[in-house]
Amino acid sequence: MDKPVKTINKYDAACPEEEANLQTLRTSLMDQETSSEMANWFKTFSDPTRLRIMDALLKKELCVQDLTVLLDMGQSAISHQLRTLRNMRIVKRRKAGKTVFYSLDDEHIEQIFLQTLQHIKHG
């Protein structure tokens, strides 16, 4: 004879002394929309070409032509990656006449990049 399926209470898996704290913790967790947005943002960092572009822009504001020479890639490929980085507000652009210069969007991007690099080199 089959056992009846037990209804799972939302705190069945909790350690007894932590049950009260879990409800408080749950209310402070990020919502699904925020976690999806954050995941998409981090996906932008998952491309080696984008990381190399960011590394170059960390050191100096550059135009597309400079990036093509530095990374030995075509203008179209660099422009595509810059568009992706701009859409995620990781890089910004500045026009000077007909030339467009790119740089990291702000100091937060620089900190995230450098801390990630430090973490990788540390381990």
Image: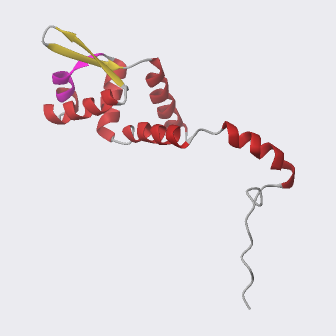
Q: Position of residue 93 (x, y in %)?
A: 27, 17
Q: Quadrant of residue 31?
A: top right
Q: Residue at x 31, y 27 (%)?
A: 86
Q: Position of residue 112 (x, y in %)?
A: 48, 28
How many marks do you count on the picture? 0
Q: Position of residue 120 (x, y in %)?
A: 50, 39
Q: Quadrant of residue 41?
A: top left
Quadrant for the C terminus, please. Answer: top right
Apparent side of residue 114 relative to residue 75 in the rendered image (left or right): right
Height in image: 85 above or below 21? above
Apparent side of residue 33 relative to residue 44 in the rendered image (left or right): right
Q: Is residue 66 magenta?
A: yes
Inspect this view and state whether residue 54 appears. yes
Quadrant for the N terminus, please. Answer: bottom right
Viewer-closest of 86 and 50: 86
Height in image: 79 above or below 32? above
Viewer-closest of 61 and 42: 42
Q: Which residues, given as a range, are shown in magenta?
A: 61-68
Extreme residue in the top direction: 97
Height in image: 2 above or below 78? below
Q: Position of residue 9 (x, y in %)?
A: 75, 61
Q: Is residue 67 magenta?
A: yes
Q: Main secondary structure of the magenta part?
A: helix
The chosen color scheme is secondary structure
Apparent side of residue 104 relative to residue 17 in the rendered image (left or right): left
Q: Residue at x 33, y 41 (%)?
A: 47
Q: Residue at x 76, y 46 (%)?
A: 22
Viewer-closest of 61 and 90: 90
Extreme residue in the right direction: 17
Q: Quadrant of residue 113?
A: top left
Q: Residue at x 35, y 27 (%)?
A: 55
Inspect this view and state whether residue 74 appears. no
